[in-house]
Image (cartoon, grey):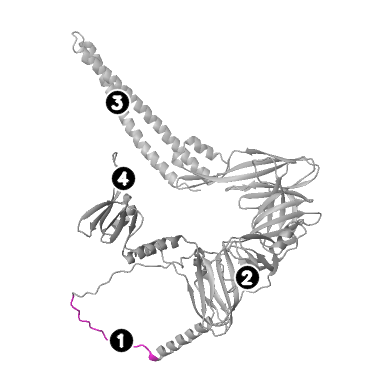
Amino acid sequence: MKLRIPISLILSAATALPADLPVKQVVLYKHGVGFFERSGRLGAGESARLDFNALEMNDVLKSLTIGGSGKISGLRYDSMDPLGRKLAEFPFQIGGGGMPGMLDQLKGARIELKLGTEAVAGIIVSARTIAGSDKQAERDQLNLLLDTGDFRTVDLAAATGLRFPDAKLQQQFKDYLAALSASRSKEKRSVYIDSSDASERDLTASYMIPAPVWKSSYRLIFVDKAPTLEGWAIVDNTTGEDWTKVQLSLVSGRPISFISQLYAPKYVNRPSAELADDTAAQVIVHSGAFEEKDKKAEGGAMNRRDMAAGRAERLMAAPAPMMKGTLGALSADAVMESISVAPSSIEAAAVGRELGDLFEYRISQPVTIRKNESAMLPFLQQTIEGRKLLIYSDHSSQHPTNAAELTNSSGKTLDGGPITVYDAGAYAGEALMETLKASDKRLISYALDLGTRITEAFGSKAAMVREIHASRGIVNTKYAAEETRTYTVRNVDQKAKTLIVEHPLRPGYTLLNQKAAEKTATNYRFELALAAGATQEFVVNEERVYDQSIAVTNLSPDILVSYLQNRSLTAAGRQQLQRIVDQKRLIAENDSALQDADAQTRGLNADEDRIRRNIQSLNNVAGQQQQVQTYARQLDAQEQQLAVLRDKQAELQKKRSVLQAALDQLVEALTF
């Protein structure tokens, strides 16, 4: 019977004993983990041991799967308790306070000290550090109760030896220090797979552990025909054991992966609960049932549960599907020998296939990579669709870049990585490429083209009113502003070229007279054919449309007149605005008359004050009665004028209120 047991155990890229379960298959991903499969034949009743780094155990416990023939009786692994919890079990803590701080925690313990030639023994009463002063240095003191009953203070700096005669306490110190040492240790952790079989059997263990991501690099070779693309995979073996003739696969894509803390024991705080012993029990009255369960239905449900449990047990005993495949061998020595050959002479040693939403390159021959070594494996060698051109994307430079437009006609997913470009048998430059799915297209730039120069000129026109609308006294105006950018391109080389201009895509702007060949998230792409030794201009016109809202009450009659003259205004809107303009002018005329009346009133009041002061002065002078009478008649006349002005002011104020109310009604009803 074959057996498959998925287990929440995490094994890190570990070193299993070579005689037990050697590595047979390795699958490397792009998100920091690798899939490892080990298999071998074990003797009757023999256990298998897998070794992992402590940091890898979380991933092993999460992903370990056991398969093969025979019965697995159990799985054990070296446990780990949190350091803080281990140390909390000891009656002392080593740390702050130094030796006095530790000894002070052991009050009542017996201790023996050597003070030169003298031996002192007693029970610890206390220990402390006495701060230093200008005359005396800091010192550590221990207070003891001697066997004679005397108390003695000992200077710890004078002690040449110290021991605890209690063997149990001595062992606790050893255990404490051993726990601290183990917490810093990076030694291996072992996982044991036990079997109760009395015969030989095959065993397979597979798991995910942290692993370096595999890296891609490419060679793009331009010749007379279609360009050739070579792909090399860079693989690092950091597991601490040799990979000898393993089946190696490289997966492009990034599945979700995370670390769960499964290795360290987890503890939870439990609530305290006590019986209520000091209260009398209450009488419990049970109510009668009003509905009874169907016994037959209950029996059927129990039978269904038993059947489901049986199905689950059979599923657990089902054979484990092995991740098999024809993965070829390419030794590290053979790979390194291939690197020295010309870029177009290698032969790809990988087979690509879709793996769900991912893409897998399966190395077609077994691979050998020794521990702590890396290898370069060719996984792609074929022609693809491509053409050479220029790209102008860096607007801070006057030169475009030599570039290539690549269409992935390989039928495979091309993992992202650096590309070294060769043109006419010579090095031409380097580029970076993102992951390219089959049939997708990408531009890559690999060098500056000093034979082409580009300058830019900017222009703009005054914003024009496109639409005018109004609602409840708010005028909404839609403006359109046009901007131009002129690219002047000079090709000084005596050969024709194709230029891609990347024009920035700005939010709120739309193209007016051009149609882009392509559009990205940040740029328009325009394609231009450049004649040999020629200069040409390319103009991009863009328009920005924006809205402006303003309350009619905040607009003066002169500004409203400018709205009336706009051709975008409808006849109904022009008629309504004209009435508002007329009403605002009536209010302005009334306000002007009111201001004049106010000015006259202020002038008469000032003149009356002057006359009153004159009268007061003349009353104290003999023979000036005639002049006083004249001033009195002037005051009477001015009072009559003031009365008329006050009536006029009141009338103008009343009229303004009426005019304003009428204006408010017109503004509120403004809609077009």
> Splitting the image into 4 quarters, where does residue 376 fall?
bottom right
Q: Badge 2 local density, few (<14 within 10 Å), some, or many (20+)?
A: many
Range drawn in magenta: 279-295
Q: CA distance from mark 3 to mark 1?
A: 99 Å
Q: Which residue is mark 1?
A: 290
Q: CA distance from mark 4 to mark 1?
A: 84 Å
Please name the amino acid that badge 3 sits on: Leu
Answer with left or right where residue 303 lies relative to residue 65.
left
Camera-near label (1 vs 2) is: 2
Please name the amino acid that badge 2 sits on: Gln
Camera-near label (3 vs 1) is: 1
User: SS for tag 1?
Assistant: loop
3 or 1: tag closer to the N-terminus: 1
Q: Residue at x 73, y 55 (%)?
A: 220
Pointer 3 with pointer 2, Cβ within 8 A: no
1 or 2: tag closer to the N-terminus: 2
Camera-near label (2 vs 4) is: 4
Screen quadrant of the N terminus: bottom right
Q: Which residue is mark 2?
A: 25
User: SS for tag 2?
Assistant: strand
Magenta span main SS: loop
Please name the amino acid that badge 1 sits on: Phe
The image shows residue 367 at horizontal and vertical percentages of 67, 66
Answer with left or right where residue 621 lies relative to residue 516.
left
On residue 642, which mark appears? 3
On residue 138, which mark appears? 4
Q: Residue at x 36, y 65 (%)?
A: 171
In the image, is residue 292 part of the stretch drawn in magenta?
A: yes
Q: CA distance from mark 3 to mark 4?
A: 99 Å
